[in-house]
Amino acid sequence: MTRRLLSSALALALGAAGAAAQTDVRIDVSGGGRRVPVHCEALAAAGDRSPKVPSALADEVLASDLDQSAVFVITRAWRGDQPFDVQAIVGGRWTVRGNEVTLIGEVRDFPARRPILSKEYRAPLAGWREIVHQFADDVVLQFTGEPGIARTRIAFVVREGRNKELHVMDADGANPHPLTADRSLALSPSWSPDGSLLLFTSYRGGGGPRVWVIAASGGKPYLVSGRPGNNTSASYSPDGREIALTLSADGNSEIYVLDARGGSPRRLTDNRAIDTSPSWSPTGREIAFTSDRGGTPQVYVMERDGGNVRRLTYEVNYTDSPAWSPQGDRIAFVARTGSGFDIYVCRADGSDARLVVGGGSNENPHWSPDGRHLVFASNRDGGFGLYVTDLDNRAPRTLDTGGRLAMSPAWSPRPAGLETAQVSTPNHSNSGGKP
Amino acid sequence: MKVAPRYLVAVLAVAVIAAFAAGCAKKAKEAPPVPPPAPPVVQQDTTPTPVPTPTPVTPPAPQVTSSDLQPAFFDFDSYALRDDARAALDRDAKLLRDNAGVAITIEGHCDERGTVEYNQALGERRAQAARDYLVAAGIATARIQTVSYGKERPFADGHDESAWAQNRRAHFVVR
């Protein structure tokens, strides 16, 4: 979708006043701080009289993106909300002409309504969601200094009878579609750092669990590791050059590192216990993993060469599914309850373990690339489905998977190139400036 | 100039016939017990060439089927062989000794508690524990393969101890 944008982003002139206002409203919202109150006004529609994508659809997607960013608390003008005590107004213009759509996204401070951000996005009509997400990400960038995650995706596994297939959808639940139709067991998807590939475990082709790679856009899977015994829980290193995974080729589940093609195995653990579920730190220097070397499964941390192994936390017992945050400061994991799991987050040194999701069984936590959210699988409402917690006191929200039984979610990185996107400093040309 | 199209038609016809013949051959190979075609009502002068059909082959009944072998059951988060598991494996070992041609796959299974990844490792441990016991009882290693299904293929669908107990097992499949 990204590649199909005609014009990815065209910063409009804001003038000196706008640039000054921009710094005034930059607020530190890191560390789960208070959400910034923002009022969404309906986009002013123009162009075709009966557009195939009416502006009201874009209004809802934009407001939903901003709400789900965990940076803002949203009021919506089109639902009769008044801009009471808000810090900014978000709106703009939505013009559909034939098969092209143009969004001029605007952020103004409140109550003065001075422009903070004004940006034009253009796309083929079929890519309309993409430019709405892009504007939402730019609004988050404006307020936090870091782009949002509205253009990310989530890979997950859907149970179909006795089988499980790999699926992928946008982070807001739109565009869900299957990647595999193997009538086999697909498990444990994990994204490459550039978002182009997915590693997964599958029993496809018969035999035991083996590690495969598939393009995130779909296609034919390629075998990465088909060694005797288990080949499971694979993930790329942050630089994409290596793969950590579990192999039992020596008769016992151990953690190995392979090169990105699946060769040159290097064993990191060596004992009689089960070692599995490796999760890289974002620097690639350490790996969190699960081991039952102490009698029951617990999360441990080791250096990338297998040295300096230490148990992550003694505050919680029977822990598994470690997920190192993209910022490196925290590790999410699950802890067993009577019949399922709760999700905890602690600091990377194991201290300050906090319960973040309880009730039902909550499994396979996985961080969003901005570290503000965890996606996880849960049976809290009956059958297994996908949920997102913003790590605050809001209840987890459901990701709509169309009534399918869904599990093992994995959040994609941001689209390639976004980190270096232009947006943060508006271009000070004088064309198109608005008073 | 007019030869070329006719030539093409001929080539096409040959190709269609060849494809049809190949299709028939493939079909016959996939489904051996095809009933012979009904005899033609009108007899031709020439003796009809009988359509060759493969002689149906009935495979000899296997001496041991998967259901003859008893699963070994396990405690939660354990791959230690309980007394009842050893008793089941003793009977399985005797059956396998008495039927030396039988090769098996041992599937390791877990209950739904525990993560996908840990249970894959635990299931493998259970299959290996059963395999090691059979090998110690004199069954050749070459006759035994193991595979772990973790918690992915439960035998009982419930969410209570009676279902979980059924699902924590080393399960035998005759290859």
Image (cartoon, coloured by chain):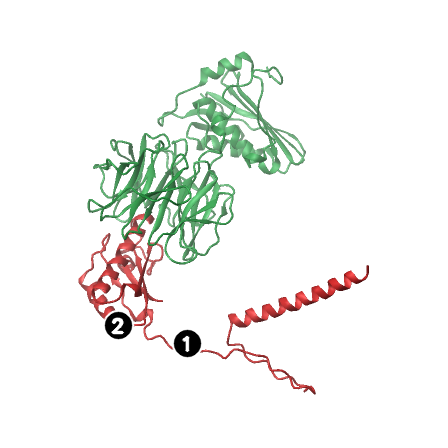
Chain colours: A green, B red
Q: What residue type is labelled 1?
A: Pro
| Residue A137 x, y percent position in the rendering | 49, 29
Q: Distance between the residues labelled 2 and 1?
A: 21 Å
Would you name the residue on which mark 1 appears? B59
Q: Given the image, what chain letter belongs to the residue carrying mark 2?
A: B
Would you name the residue on which mark 2 appears? B95
User: What label does residue A33 carry, if any?
Assistant: none
| Residue B107 x, y percent position in the rendering | 32, 60
Q: In which quarter of the image is the N terminus of chain B?
A: bottom right
Q: Quadrant of the C terminus of chain B?
A: bottom left
Find residue A85 and report its image quarter: top left
Q: Which amino acid does label 2 sit on?
A: Leu
Q: Is residue B63 left or right of residue A146?
A: left
For the residue pair B86 and A211, the one nearer the viewer reads as A211
The kind of secondary structure element at disc 2 is helix
For the residue pair A218 and B141, the one nearer the viewer reads as B141
Query: Which residue reaches farthest left?
Result: B83
Which residue is found at the position 44% from the left and 35% from the top?
Answer: A413
